[in-house]
Every structure is written in structure tokens, then in C-alpha cells.
Amino acid sequence: MSFSFDKLNQQPLAFQPKSGERFLQSAGYTRLLRISSVPDPSPTSCSSVWRRVTQLQSSIGTITNYFFAKTRKRGTTEKEEADPVDLQEPTPFSYFALQQLFPGRVPRNPDAIREVITSLGKPLDDRKLLFEDVITMLATASKLPGHGLPRRVNAFQGHFLNLLWDDLSHPPTVDLLPEHRYRSADGSHNNLTGFPLLGAARQPYARSVKPLHRIPPDIAEPEELFDAILRRDHQHDGFKQHPYGISSLLFAFANIIIHDLFWTKHEEPWQNLTSSYISLDPLYGIDLEEQEKVRDNMGENLGRGLLYNDTFASKRLLMMPPASAALLILFSRNHNRVARKVLELNERNQWKREVESLLPEQRRKQDDEIFGTARHVNCAYFTGIILSDYLQTILGTIPVDSDWRFDPRLTIKSLLGSTPKATGNSVSVEFNILYRWHSTISLGQERWLENKMAKGLPSREWDKLDSVSFQRAIDQLKKELSAEDGSEPRHWKLSRLHLQHTSAETHHLPDVYDRDPDTGKFRDAVIAKLLKESTSEFAGAFGARGVPAVLKWVDCQAMHTARDIWRVCTLNEFRQYFNLKPFKTFAEWNSNTEIASAMEELVGHPSNIPLYAGLHGEEAKEPRPGAGLCPGYTISRAILSDAVALVRGDRFYTDCATADAMTDWGLKDCQPDIREGSYGGLMQKLIINNLPNQYCYNDVALLFPFMVPEKIYDILKEISPDKACHYSLRSPNPPKPFGFSSIKIFNERTLVYELSDSEIVQKDRMEKLFGTPHMRSNISTVYDCLFSVVDGNEWNKFESFIREMISKSAIRRSKTTKDLTLDICRNVINPLVSGWLAHMLGLCEIGLHSRQLLLTALSDVYVYLTESQMTYKTQSSAKVVAEEFVRQIRYHIESAIAPSSIGKLVQKGTAMVAVGALNALEDTLKFLSPQNSTSDKNLHRNPFEFYTRLVAQNSRKDNLTSDELAADCFRAVATLAYSLTHGSAHALDYLITPESLPSEEKAQVIYSLKELNRQIREDTSRFEQPQFRDRYTKYGLEATRLNHWVPELQGFIYKVDRNSTVDKGHIGMIDCKCDLSRDQQEYAKLLDSTGHCLKFYKKVICVIVKEVTSLPDVQRAPGRQGELSKIQILDSVSGIPTMHIRYNGQTNCPVGNKQELSLSWK
């Protein structure tokens, strides 16, 4: 159906309007007449139904034209009709589209209207040519007849121009000046759009609200306001624990945020000594002078971007209860962790790891760059914790079982424009007052404050505390903590909280924690103790009469400053600024009659309530979803606006939060992960990374440290009792250290120690994985039976498989070269190993468990079993994999057991049916894929042979249950999959030389390998001889040993000196000399601590080394592709190896030739 629009008939004004126009005659009859006096389009039929449809359409067009009109003028003129510029607001996109549609103005492409409307606020799919449709609509609409239509076109065109204008920042918020890449020491140049000092340190406070209300002279003094409204009275149970169960650690964290943003200069109270950005100034300092005191940029560490161990800059936070200092130490450690990692990875090869080879100015430049990068990532951790752990607690979102989080950094674009970001920020005096949350101080912290202040005022009559006694107490505290004026922050001590001891016990304990004199660090257990104590203690509740009396002098000084110097607004003015209803009665402010009456007596009228006492004495919210912090209603509204301003206005959290400034690894490392068990919280990651082996992986004190453990556990039980079962309330003993360490002894030998018995640790983790305590195990039987089904001709079939995979995977990237490129790990080694193991154990390898995914899943399990500290994420990932694969293995085991009863016979039959179904499913999927290969058919015997031998051995020796036996098989295949793939990848990484020249020793090894390859090429039958395969095996083993995937084991040999007296756990030593004639026993524990994987590795590594290194002119691919690294598939924990190689191939290889990699083993 199409319409043709004719010119308007010039009808006389007395023309009778159509149906539907009389309704609007009085509001502009003449205008409506001119718009609607269009002859009806010729219908395709003459039916009465069609006439009614067209009449209805015309009436709708009349109304929409009227309501969408932007002018109130009556009558028409030629000038108005053809005005080229519309000074009115642009017509919204959707209005224009509807306006064109309703009167019958259907565009040539009707889908354009639908696309316009459905794409509002969404990313545009430019392949649908929506912009072209819009331009076409503009062009065609301008040709249509109708009064005022060109104005509509111009109005819509204006909106279209606004859309294009908003695509780019005006002016740009980011530039490429190297000095602007990282945060400056004083916070300047955060705003690059003309205000470089906006929010910098030593700049004046801002004012948010105009104070217009005249304050009567009879308002009470701050001291009276404090005693009547704010003071905590212990004689009448004055302390009220937080109703939502927030721990004092949250407010220790808030203390860092507050002191990051506010530091009033006493001599000039309008000046803020710190920056107005969340930039961890308490850690890094407020200016270059303070920053230099915490940076370890002297001597051998210059060029590494480090901080002094466990050091922070803020003496103010050192003088407070120690939980805040403990948190700062975590961030100090995290900075050094990040700095070491980015230098180790050196993603863009811009830095030198051997800093001693650099000139002094080069070392200083590299030190500044790494320091800036590490600070950028560390501050992203800080903000991530604020937006996840901190805000999810404040907003009370955990009870709704949601991983949603409030994120002000989101890019917001719509047809109405985009929300600005990276504009800078300047904190105001009103928020300086708002964030004095002294009522939340816990009982333990209150006792700590009283004990410290008593050294300046022994009488403990806190009403008499003044500036002299306060300073005397601070000076004494500085002396205790070695923080006197002029002291270096790296020598400061930590205060002890004495939370878990009686007064008699505390009398004999020191008041401080000392540093290790050798490392300058505090013990991990000390920091963990301070954090756990703070987590276990209830914070105080917001509201009136909650501030400890010991802080009376501090609060009263703040109220005097707010009233007499800053002259801030009243509470009602502050509320009106945020569009909140002003209080008309004191009962509205606080429903407690006693407190409301006290305030009425002090100020007379609700409009006179001062901002300080009004904010902190206001009635607090009750806990509920959306309100976890439970402050006063006014505070609750204002802090969210402030959070948006602080984060969204900071360019380092918005436009500069890029991989360019933070590195690829750094940008990813600071991202939240909902699989960590804390609804996307980052605090647990900060703790685990910097306090290893101090918390159990599922301890609620680790995963939800801002909540008292008992309260959060009750919330989890209310969500679901099954969910609570995944968490631990009572903190068990922290896990023992797990991994390896090396120690140099007097004769310059380096001994390697295993920190814990790996077999015991892995058995314990398997029990946790399956929820079966006292699970029996004999994994040696599994390895022995598995190896017994490996025949002597494996090498021949591996050889064929590798050749086929190389042939199918290699691509020629350019027509001008003969070089072929492939990922030797992903395309060859990984499918070889995972497919081999899958067939031997009968694991399904198609669909969700194709070879790459199978390897990824098994690698996740291996990481869970061997990582230094188990995490919630690795445990949950391994559990998902275990449930699937152990079920498959158990079916195979039960199908191989000889039935001894009717029940066992039924069980065997069920298992056989399940195995048959899995095999049929796998074969069907392979047939449909189609994934067929000539090289890997009949590569092994049927897995039934392995399971038959395993069941027979088990019945004679251990008599494990089928579940226990399946768990052992599962652990074995995970260990084999990870060890064989990573061992082979690292061997090739060593043997395929990079572009830089290798060492002389390594060059000799590579030359001898090339000579061996030449001999094999001359007579390919030589590889059939065991002695030649053994020679390739030695190259592979030695290369793996020297380039082990565990850094502590690079150069490791299994060789215990029986004549020396060494501690338990000694497993070998480090020898970095390449020796192809080593005794095979020295490689016994190269791949796993039990030594079971070596015999399997020998079967595969000789073929891999021979086939890959014998490729013509084989070398690494240029750039980062040629480096050995890991990639993560889907949401894996571990990642799989990847490394591209290049070799001289056939000239007739088609460019881009590449086939699917998943081939059938059967």
C-alpha cells in the first residue's frame, strides 16, 4: 500500500473541517484547517472499512501535529513556513518519527521508523544503515507538503546535530602528554579542560549550598548542642550497635576515604591540604615531598617503582585506631605486588628488568613510569572496593541475593545527549561536615581512644579536654609509634588494639607492633589479627547521642569552624539543595520526643537546626534492602550524589582507565568477579593477594569483611540454607603455606623445599571438593594402570597426529612470503594431550567438552589442587568440572566391576547404559560436526581395558569405593593434562630461540639439536630406534627443567644430599647448567611432586620436540604472538598455553588456509 501526497488545496477559510478537527477549533481553527485540508489518498479499495481507516488516520495526524507543534502562533505566514533556522528546542527523534507516521507519511523504508524507536539509548548497529535512513527521512520529509513542516525538519536536524556533537568530548578530557598519563603527587591536572588546579592539594574548599537563612542570635553554643544531642552516655547503655550488623572495619575503610578527601589547614581553615580525589593520598602523600618519603627509589630498587615495605604517608591515620593503618598496609603491599608484576610482564617491552644496565636518568624515568602504573592499578582496586564491598554494604543489596552494583563510571549515551565525566572535582565544606561519622566508633575503638587521650588528660574528665591536653596526648602517641616530627614513615610502628584480652592481660602486652628489622615488614599474622578483630566487632549506630564523650573537643571545634568561619547553610537549606522536603517540625527531624524537645529548646525552630548537629542527630533509617548503612535520611541521600561526583568526575577512573595506562594485566587484575563468592567484592582479593594463608577460602570474615560474621551468615541462611553451606562462619585454622621455596647455603648451593606435603594438601582439597571427609586414596594405582595400557607405538601415532595438525592449522598470511604461521600450543600440543587423555579415560570431548575446553576444565582443577592458597573462585570452578567428569569416570568404573549381587548387577547395567549413551552422543556429534581425522583413529585401546585393570588392582589392594576411585582418576588426569601441556610448551619456548641471540651454552644445545634433526631427515627410519627417541627426550626434559612453568623450580633437579643435615621438606636443588647427560632420576619430580607424570611425558615430548624443531627455518612469530603466554577461554581460572611459530612452508599454500582443530580420536 502506498500513498501519494498532493499539494494542499487552497480552500477558503470557511471550509468545513473534517471529523476530528472540530474538537480543536477553538485552539487554532485556521491552523488546523490548513494542515488537514488534504484530499484523502486514493484507497486501494472503495470499501467503507477502508474509508473509516483513512479518516481515523487523518484525525490522528491532526491531533499529533497539534500537540507536537512548538509554537503558539495563530495564523500563518510564508516566513514562518519556510524559516531555515528553528530557534526552538530540537524535536525529539521519536516524536519526529511518529509525526511522520501518524498522518500517513509512511517513509519509503517502513523499518526505519521501527529501528529509530527501538534503538533509543542503545548502541547503533551501523550495518543496518540507520543513520542513512535518518538522512533519507530528513531529505524526503522536507519535500512533503504541509504547513510548518520545514520547521519540523530543521528542528529534528538540530537534534541530529546534537547527537553527532555529543559523540566527542568538547573539549577533549584526555591528552597524550607523558606527565598527564599518571596521577600527579598533589592531584593537579586531573581536569585537562582548562582547570588544572581543580581539586588539587592546598586549594580552597568549595561551597555547595548558598547559606541564605538568617540565624537568630539565641541559638545554643556547640558545647550545649554536643551534650544534649550528640554525646554518648554510657551510664544509660549509650552505645547502640549497628542495626544491620556492619563491622567496624567498614568505618576504618571509610576513615581512609574521608582522610583522602579532607584535611583542613588549621591556620587557614578554608584550605584543603589534600586533593579532592579518591587517590589514596594517605598512602602516597599529598605532595612530592611526602611521596618521596614512602618511595623505595634509592639503591638497587631504583627503576622498579616500589614503595618501602608496609609504609604509608599519613601520620593522621597512624594516630587513630589501627584498623585503618592495617588497611593502608594492604594497599602498600598491593602497590609493590602490581609494580613487580608489570615489570615482570613488560607487555610493551618498554622497560628493562635488569635495571642495573640503565643509566641513572633512565632508571629514574622507568621508576616513575612503573610507580605511576602501579598507583593507577592500586587506586582502581581502592575504587573497586568502594563500588563493590563498601557500597553493597551501604546499600544493603546482599539480602536480595543480587550481584548488581552501583557504578557511576558507566558511559551514558542517549538521543538526549551524554552524561559528562572526567570533569574534575572539588570537595565542599558541607561534605566535610557530613562525613564526621563519630557515632559509629565501636566500643573497642572508644576504649582505645580513651586510653590514648588519658596520657594527655589523666583525669579522664573529657569535658576539660582542650588543645593543650589533646596535643600532649598526640605527642605521646607519636613517641610510642616512633612517629615524631622528622621521622621516616618506613620506621613507624603499629598500635595494638587489645580487643580480645582482659585488662589484666593487656597490662603485660606491649602497646605496639614492631617491624621485622631485616625486611621492614610487619608479620602477616599481625595485619590479619587487626583486620579480623575489626571485622568481628560491631560498629556503632548512626543517630543522636552516639558520639563518644572523648571526642567532644574535636566535634565542638568542628561546629565552631562550620558556624563562625565557613558559615555553612542550615539543615533545611541542605535538604532543599537535594530537593528533599524541609522539616517543618522537630518531630519530623527525629521522632524521639526527648531528642526533638532538646533540639527545640536549643534552636527554637526547625529552620534553625545547624547542619552539623542536624545531620548527625537526625533519626536514622531502619535496615532494609536499599538501606544498609542506616544513617540519617539526609546523609543517606547526599552520599550517593557525592559518590557519583567523586568517581565519575575523576578522569583516571573514567577516560583514563585504559589498558594503555594500566597495562592489559593491570586493567584485568582490578576487575571484580562474581564467582569469588562475595557478589563481586574486591576486598577478599586484596586480602588474599597480600596476606597469604591467613584466611580460609570460604570464611565470611574474608568474603564479607565489612559485616560482622554472625550477621552476614544469618543473611546468607535467610537467602538459602544451601547457599550458607558454602561459607564458613567459625574461622578454621588458616591453611599451611603451600608451594616451594629456595634457600642458599654456605657452599653457594640452592636447596629447594616443599612448604607442605603436596600429597596431603591435595587429598585435603579433594575432600573439600567432594564434601567427603576422610576420603581414602591411592593414586599410584591409577597411574600404574593407566600407563600399563600405553603400548610401545605411541610415538608413531603422535607423529602422524602432529603432522596433520600442523598441515591443517598453518596459514600463509601474505602472498609475498613462503612462511607459514600457527599457534603450536593451541593447535597442536593442547589437542594432542587432551585428546589422548580423554580417550584413555573415556571422557567425552565434543560439545561443551571439546579438546580446548576439556583442557581448560582440567587445568582449572589442577590450579585448585596446587595453588598456594585456595580461593572461593577456584574451588567453585573445580567443583563444576568435578561433578561432570567424575560422574563419567564412575560410570566406566561401575561398568567394569563384576557384579556380586542383584543390586550390583543393576548398578553395572545402569552404568553400561550411561557409558553407551555418552559414546553414542559423542559419535553423533562428531558425525554431525564433521570432525574426522585419518591420523588418530584406533590410537589407543578401548578405555574399558584400563578400567578393568584398575578395578582388579583395587580389589586386591585398597578396595576403594567407586567414588574414591573416580576421584583418584580425576585428580590424575587433571595433573597429567596440565603438566604435559605446560611442560611441552615451556620446552619449545626454550628450544625455539627468540630474535635476540641466545647464550653460548644455549646456542650449543640448539646447534646440536639441529644436527640431530639433520640425521633424522637423512634417514627417517632412525627415529624408530629407541636411542634416537631418547636423545630427543633428553632435549625436552632439560629444556623443561631450565624453563619450568613454576619460577621457583627453574633449574630444579631431584637430588637430596643425604650427608647434609637439612630440614624436612627438602626435595632437591637448583642447577642452571644445561647438561644433556643427566641421570634420568634427577627429573623424577620435574612435573609433579609424586613423580608419576614423568613416564607419560617421555612418551610425548620426544615426538613434539622432533616434529616442531625439524620444521624448515622454524622460529618464533614476530612480536607478542611469538612469546609463550596464557589465554583464558570463557571464564576459566587457569588459562591454556599459546605461542605462535613460523616456518618456511610450501609456496602453493593458500593464504588464510586454516581448518577446524577438533579432530576425532576414535
Image (spheres, rainbow, N blue to C red):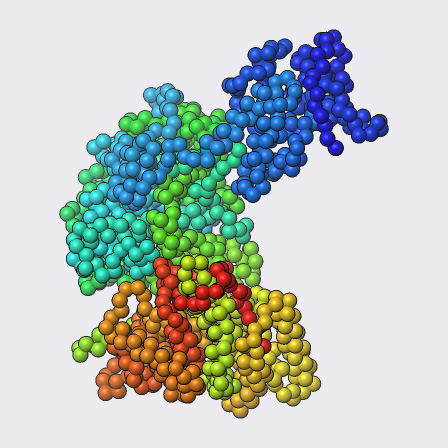
The quarter of the picture where the N terminus appears is top right
The quarter of the picture where the C terminus appears is bottom right
| Furthest residue in direction left, as rendered | 486
Kindly identify the residue that appears in the image at 45 percent across and 27 percent down.
576
| Furthest residue in direction bottom, as rendered | 956
In the image, residue 739 lies at what x, y percent?
A: 35, 71
Q: Is residue 152 left or right of residue 1143?
A: right
Q: Nearer the viewer, residue 814 or 117?
A: 814
Q: Is residue 784 left or right of residue 1?
A: left
Above or below: residue 23 compared with residue 624: above
Kindly identify the residue that appears in the image at 42 percent across and 26 percent down.
573
Q: Is residue 816 left or right of residue 1042?
A: right
Above or below: residue 1079 compared with residue 75: below
In the image, residue 914 lies at what x, y percent?
A: 65, 75
Q: Nearer the viewer, residue 506 or 1060?
A: 1060
Q: Is residue 124 visible?
A: yes
The image quarter in which residue 976 lies = bottom left
Q: Nearer the viewer, residue 50 or 710?
A: 50
Kindly identify the residue that appears in the image at 38 percent across and 74 percent down.
1109
Q: Is residue 1063 left or right of residue 788?
A: left
Kindly identify the residue that appears in the image at 65 percent across and 87 percent down.
899
Q: Is residue 439 visible?
A: no
| Furthest residue in direction right, as rendered | 47
